[in-house]
Image (cartoon, coloured by chain):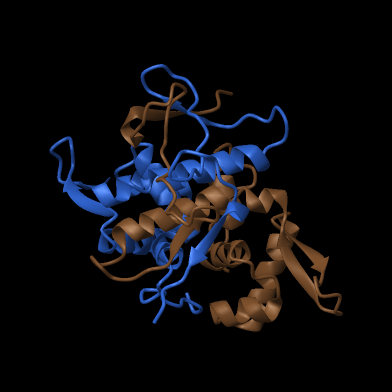
Chain colours: A blue, B brown
Amino acid sequence: MARRVSHEGAECPVARAVDVVGDRWSLLIVRDAFDGITRFGDFQRSLGLAKNILASRLKDLVGAGILEIVPAADGSAYHEYALTEKGRELFGIVVALRQWGEDHLFADGEPHSVLLDATHERPLQRLQVIDAEGRPLKSTDTFVRKVIH
Amino acid sequence: MARRVSHEGAECPVARAVDVVGDRWSLLIVRDAFDGITRFGDFQRSLGLAKNILASRLKDLVGAGILEIVPAADGSAYHEYALTEKGRELFGIVVALRQWGEDHLFADGEPHSVLLDATHERPLQRLQVIDAEGRPLKSTDTFVRKVIH
């Protein structure tokens, strides 16, 4: 991507995170990994993505320590991609994207997939931004303190 | 972007959300808007982005109903970009990206900007994915139910 600029040295954690996962394909690969997809061919079928682009994104995600290559669960010669602990901790980001999408990108009554808890098969609660005492915060109740040099 | 594929018809809310904001520049523009940036020149200085790309991303965000164009607060001839309600509700996504970045993309003791609540100037609590009863959930405690046709 010609306009790729690295924020690796940025002091803003959002910028660094976006540098690693702020790409539509990377985010969708991570979503698929949460949904249990592990193999190249299955990612490809799910995403309808050109092989070379998929291979490049998977390589980047492995390089970033978000996915790791593991032997196939069935003992075959294939290898599989599994989320690392760092990758699994992207769950909140994927849930936040899902909830915002549910709220704003579907017409009333338009069907969409739902995320349920495995024990009771009920929808999750909404993610809430809260202060140290648990009070809900809007963006305007917060501010960013920059690093002082 | 040559490989742009629309997920507008997708049944997965994550895919639709990623379609609208799953782009590094869009996410950073939204972050800047939360930080109070409103003017083209200020976005440009903050992001170091070519004017044509910034203009295109701002247009897309306005088109998606995330930003709106408003008269300049100082009464000058400039116009400004303000987050809509739909845009402000992206806050959880930006906070999730920030917290993941803080956890995984900085060395111990490496300085980074922090998000504080405006009243007490204390760091926020971590976002938690919780079930209907408030029990914390990991990704493996959940599953996605697809739409049945």
What number of labels is visible? 0
In the image, B5 versus A15, the foreground residue is A15
| Image location (x, y in percent) of residue B127 | 43, 43
For image coordinates 37% across by 68% down, the residue present is B112
Residue closer to the observer: A143 or B80: A143
Q: With respect to residue B75, does A125 lie above or below?
A: above
* Residue lying farthest to the front in this orientation: B120
Relative depth, front residue between B106 and A87? B106
Q: Position of residue A15 (x, y in %)?
A: 45, 67
Looking at the image, residue A119 lies above or below residue A107: above
Q: Is B54 above or below relative to B96?
A: below
| Residue A84 appears in the rendering | no
Task: Using residue B8 as the reference point, say whether residue A74 is left or right of it.
Answer: left
In this view, the residue farthest toward the top is A120
User: Quick check: A58 left or right of B40?
Assistant: left
Residue found 41% across the figure and 16% down from its top: A120
Q: Quadrant of the N terminus of chain B?
A: bottom right
- Residue B110 picture location, percent across and down: 28, 70
User: Which residue occupies the foreground of this view, A53 or A6?
Assistant: A6
- Residue A85 visible at all: yes
On the image, the x and y values in percent for residue B105 come to: 31, 64
Q: Relative to residue B127, is residue B37 drawn left or right?
A: right
Residue at 36% x, 18% y: name it: A119
In the rendered image, the quadrant that contains the C terminus of chain B is: top right
